[in-house]
Image (spheres, rainbow, N blue to C red):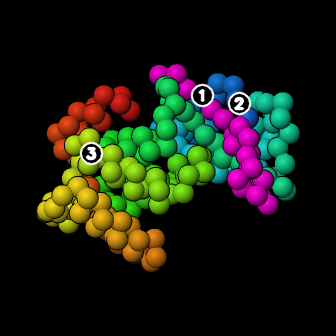
Amino acid sequence: MPISRFLQQSEKADRSRSTLIALPDIPEEEIAALLGIDADEADDVHDLRPEHAEFFRSRTAAELDFADYEYLLITHLAEPVGPVEAVVRGVIHDGQFDWVMADSLLWYAGQQSRISGTPAHELAMAATEALLADGLAELGEVGFEPWPGSREELLARAAREYEELWKDRQGPGFWIANTPAGNEAAKSLGR
């Protein structure tokens, strides 16, 4: 699967001002050793710290200025997808193995928000709507009891639950379960 890695450089004073710095091909093992992570986590989004500067300076002509900028290491696998699709893919991938906590969807939305600049709550709601509209997942309670109601009612309830999670960050919120179509879609991702 083709991989592209970038550094996202964002001004500390105005995070909306950011640029991407293309990186050459760097093996997952090198990224893992640098960041102290497992190699299978190398394609996640990672904050970089000043101690990582020399590693990336040796691989790009760009000067890294940690005094005025923040840096994220971003990896795109295969063709890049939009932030909503990336959240949906993360949720259905995880949903192959177990029910997914709403808090996990919020985490994926937060990661994509950092990359795209789209507010996390907008991404969370758009991804939830896509999961339901495409028949990829159901929403429900612990022990997986699907919520009854129309798609609009489910989205309204999810919005209220997300709001509570954003306020106090306690508990999993509700649960998301893949449908058979969600499991099939997840298998096609090849992750």
Q: Label 1 to label 3, Cα distance in Å?
A: 30 Å
Instruction: Please tell me which residue is depicted at 44% across the width and 45% down the height of the picture.
Output: 84
Q: Residue at x 76, y 30 (%)?
A: 59
- Compared to 154, does 46 lie above or below? above
**First in residue order: circle 1 vs circle 2:** 1
* Badge 2: residue crowd in 10 Å (few <14, some 14–19, many ≥20): some
Three-letter code for the amino acid on which mark 3 is drawn: Ala
User: Tag 2: residue type?
Assistant: Ala
Lower position in the chain sequence, tag 3 or tag 2: 2
Say if mark 1 contacts mark 2, CB within 8 Å. yes
Disc 3 crowd, CA 10 A, few/some/many (<14, 14-19, 20+): few
Residue at horizontal 20 percent and vertical 37 percent from the top: 181
Q: Is residue 131 left or right of residue 120?
A: left
Tell me the quadrant of the picture where the C terminus can be found.
Answer: top left
Checking the image for residue 22, the label placed there is 2
Res. 36 visible in picture: no
Residue interval drawn in magenta: 1-20
SS under mark 3:
helix
Give the number of the disc on residue 163: none
Left or right of residue 34: residue 88: left
User: In the rendered picture of this protein, how many numbered marks are placed on residues?
Assistant: 3
- Dominant secondary-structure state across the stretch colored magenta: strand
From this view, report whether residue 56 is shown above or below residue 16.
above
Q: Residue 4: which numbered mark, if any?
A: 1
Q: What label does residue 133 carry, if any? A: 3
16 inside magenta stretch: yes
